[in-house]
Image: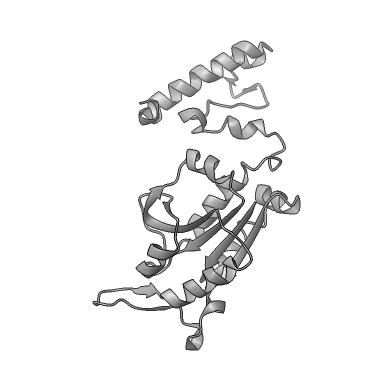
Amino acid sequence: MKIDIITVLPELLQSPFAHSILKRAREKGLLEVNVVNLRDHTLYARAQVDDYAFGGGAGMVMMVEPLVQAIESLQQTTRYDEVIYLTPDGETFNQKMANSLSLKNNLLLICGHYKGIDQRVRDHFITREISIGDYVLSGGELAAAVLTDAIGRLIPGVLNDETSALTDSFQDNLLAPPVYTRPEEFRGWKVPDILLSGNHKRIEEWRQEEAVKRTAERRPDLLE
């Protein structure tokens, strides 16, 4: 899979992709992540990429020309399955969406900034608009990192044990059950006996019961 990210702050995206699971995915050649500096695609003086909004009001707007230049330049060599704009008013990102996007070959993510991007870019180039939650960030870079991480770990071969992703929270609309590791007892707090029984059928039944219980307590909306 290839993910290209257009941003005005490429420095913010250096660390998230240089460590842990995403680093291994890139080293294995399973995931390619390219961070594109929008300022390299502007013809305006001092690498300008934003301007005041028509009609007045506070805040700056990302200009149509640099964004279109960047998008069309990338499209010359890559055919994107989705061109995604990260924005608070997009559809809320969830595990089902991550699963679906992980099956794509090429994604282009556009990080908003300031008061957002010129609407003409949204009207003519964006195929999907996504939000990671009902709050506002300073820019779309952190949201792009969240999407890339959530999608990238689902690519076959990225995780050492591919079944691990299948038992994550929100798969099958359930939260994950409690988990324990050594020691078996700490300060009198014991691991449930069932997990030490070696009876894998009963252990799976217990985990399913606990997942349903936890979901009912914390996210009953998922069971509706």
128 up-or-down from 163: above or below? below
Q: Residue furthest right?
A: 28
Q: Residue 35: name its quadrant.
A: bottom right
Give me the residue at 56% from left, 62% from top.
5
**Residue 60 coordinates in the image, percent (x, y):** 35, 75
State the residue at coordinates (24%, 77%).
56
Q: How is the image coloured?
A: one colour
Residue 33 drawn above or below residue 92: below
Q: Residue furthest bottom?
A: 45
Visible in this render: residue 193? no
Toward the viewer: 24 or 91?
Answer: 91
Figure quadrant of residue 41: bottom right
Given residues 193 and 128, the one toward you in this image is: 128
Between residues 152 and 76, which one lies in front from this camera angle?
76
Q: Is residue 39 left or right of residue 86?
A: right
Quadrant of residue 86 in the image? bottom left
Q: Is residue 101 left or right of residue 219?
A: right
Whole-percent x and y of residue 114?
A: 39, 70
On the rendered image, what quadrant is the C terminus found in? top left
Q: Position of residue 201 (x, y in %)?
A: 63, 12
- In this rendering, the answer to whether 223 lies above or below 91 is above
Is residue 8 in view from this perspective?
Answer: yes
Q: Residue at x 39, y 48 (%)?
A: 91
Between 79 and 11, the residue placed more toward the observer is: 79
Count of residue discs: 0
Residue 126 x %, y %? 44, 60
